[in-house]
Amino acid sequence: MIERLRIDRLGAQGDGIAETAQGPVYVPFALAGETVSAEIRGQRAQMVQVEEASPLRVQPVCAHFGQCGGCSIQHLAVEAYAAWKREKVVRALELSGVEAEVGELVTCPPATRRRVALSARKAVGTVLLGFNAAMSHDIVEIRDCAVAVPEIVAALGDLRELAGVLATGPKPIRLTVTATRTGLDIAADGVGRVDEGRRRGLVELCLGRRFARLSVDGEIIIERKKPVVMFGDVPVVIPPGGFLQATEQAEAVMAALVTEHLAGAKFVADLFAGSGTFALRLARQSRVHAAESEARALTALDEAARHAPGLKPVSVEKRDLFRRPLLPKELAAFDGLVFDPPRAGAEAQSEQIAKSEVRKVAAVSCNPGTLARDLAILAKGGYRIVRVVPVDQFLWSAHVEAVALLEKPRRRG
């Protein structure tokens, strides 16, 4: 059923929200103040036409926008977009009762996303390679991408050819592609068994296209060159499919905020340390203890630290901080701390930090909701939030990164 809707506001996921007698209806790609005709399907609607456009509506930069599910909000003017992203952080803090100064959004330019997760599958007479459509498992084939770095965009044809060898049936596979200093690192998942014939074909293709490394379901098929990224001035060989901040620009901004805040600390804990995004930079100014549950990431961090000249001592610990957070007695060794957990946040660890006397804490998160919850815990434990800085690492999506800087006053007496 097609109806005429007035869009009241922009939702947290980038959908326009129309209030109706039956409740809110979410309309993708609609903006606040617009009148649209849309086909309503329960609480969601598919827009048919914009009848009265918002003055804030702009022309999307990508031809795939509206079909590809990678970006949700290319059609909003820059200043309004930045305000919407910042407001997501402000609102999350307010809902958790957290009072904090939230800075302006730190922006990242287009064509800087160094890691993308592509879907691929065999189709009749072709191979589909691209991103899933919004709220769907359908693959939208892409020939360009406005957020990815040029090295990835230039390789889309070669990646499609690679997907043709890897995807043997209609079931989709996933290619996580990372642009490194030594070439593209490709981690394929959902492929299944690779026989010797296919293995040889994959090796020949990767050599011909000069990919740095290909791994399939965690097994390295070929490593022509070790994939190297730089954390500050320290080279790190990242593990296949391991976590990496999406853009170098956002990583540099967040790392600068963290290292400046923790300057002067003699011994720093880096919790959920990954492969050393923060630890290896902090080791230029402080002794560091890095805790991480992923063994391959921790090995990469340890190897990098051992071979980098001029670093202060870096110790590593394999530890599941969700199940076994560092306790106040252990935290007593540190005068600075940074934590950067997955989207679920660090509730258990925050409870222990709140009971500790660590002087300075930096919290990094890609989820404003769980960040706000963790900050509320820390504030209840006596920490003062110095400031919160939102960072637009995930351009034109509903996601936003944030760095919160906290201090605990010294006890008197």
Image: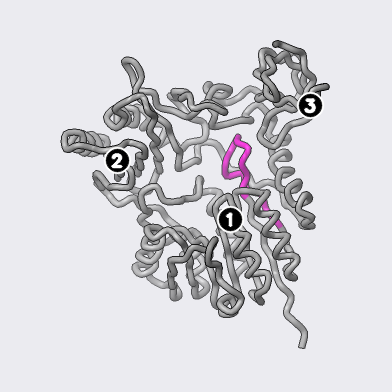
Q: Are marks 3 and 2 in contact (CB under 8 Å)?
A: no
Q: Earlier in the sequence, mark 2 or mark 1?
A: 2
Span shown in magenta: 388-401
| Of labels 1 and 3, the one closer to you | 3
Return the residue found at the far top: 2
Residue located 45% across and 61% down the image: 293
Residue located 75% across and 18% down the image: 53
For label 3, the SS is strand
Is residue 63 covered in magenta? no
Mark drawn on residue 254: 1
Cα separation, mark 3 vs mark 2, equals 51 Å
Cα separation, mark 1 vs mark 3, equals 40 Å
Q: Amino acid at mark 2?
A: Phe
Mark drawn on residue 211: 2
The N terminus appears in which quarter of the rendering? top right
Return the residue found at the far right: 21
Tell me residue 149's x, y (percent). 46, 38
At label 2, counting other C-alpha atoms closer than 10 Å, the crowd grade (few under 14, some 14-19, many 20 or more) is many
Most common SS among magenta residues: loop
Q: Is residue 82 above or below residue 388?
A: above
Q: Quadrant of residue 387?
A: bottom right
Q: Earlier in the sequence, mark 1 or mark 3?
A: 3
Q: Considering depth in this image, is 200 or 65 the residue closer to the camera?
A: 200
Tell me residue 84's x, y (percent). 72, 38
Q: Is residue 317 above or below residue 230?
A: below
Q: Considering depth in this image, is 163 or 217 the residue closer to the camera?
A: 217
Q: Is residue 410 above or below residue 303?
A: below
For label 2, the SS is loop
